Amino acid sequence: MAGARMRQLRGMEIVSKGGQVRRIAELEYLVHSQHTRSWYSVQRKGGRWLCECPDYLKRKQTCKHGYAIAFMLDLPRILSINLHPSDLNCPCAQMPHTGLLEKELEQ
């Protein structure tokens, strides 16, 4: 469990830096490595984020790159809750709650 929590925190760190995630298709992103100049391809398949990084290839569990995308996609809802706790939709973007982050955190 501690390993998953660290990956979640590292995912948040990636998002907080900005410019570390690029969308290349509807369900595919590139996420910048924190340790090299590489970019990892991360795809949503079968309800999970699949990554080509060494951590994901070894463990077959959501890695920090997958968590980064889940947090980034759920950011409008997170911000909205903090601004207007009674409103679970982003008032500007009219973005509904996706539930992606909760699904990733359950794994």
Image (spheres, grey):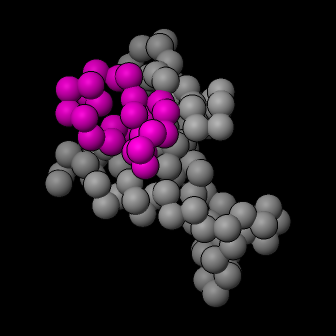
Q: Quadrant of residue 94?
A: bottom right
Please say whether residue 24 is one of the residues in the magenta stretch.
Answer: no
Residue drawn at (60%, 68%), measured in percent from left and top? 97
* Residue 48 point in image, percent of width and height: 40, 45
Q: Quadrant of residue 10?
A: top left
Span shown in magenta: 42-67
Q: Residue furthest bottom?
A: 86
Looking at the picture, does residue 70 appear above or below residue 50?
below
**Left or right of 33, for residue 19:** right
* Residue 30 point in image, percent of width and height: 55, 26
* Residue 49 point in image, percent of width and height: 42, 40
Q: Residue furthest right?
A: 92
Instruction: Mark yes or no: residue 13 visible.
Output: no
Q: Nearer the viewer, residue 70 or 98?
A: 98
**Left or right of 74, for residue 93:** right
Q: Residue furthest top?
A: 37
Quadrant assignment for the C terminus: bottom left
Please say whether residue 45 is one of the residues in the magenta stretch.
Answer: yes
Residue drawn at (33%, 42%), measured in percent from left and top? 62
Residue drawn at (52%, 43%), measured in percent from left and top? 69
Q: Nearer the viewer, residue 32 or 98?
A: 98
Instruction: Mark yes or no: residue 93 visible.
Output: yes
Looking at the picture, does residue 26 appear above or below residue 103?
above
Quadrant assignment for the N terminus: bottom left
Looking at the picture, does residue 80 appear above or below residue 22?
below
Residue drawn at (45%, 39%), measured in percent from left and top? 45
* Residue 36 point in image, percent of width and height: 42, 14
Looking at the picture, does residue 7 appear above or below residue 76?
above
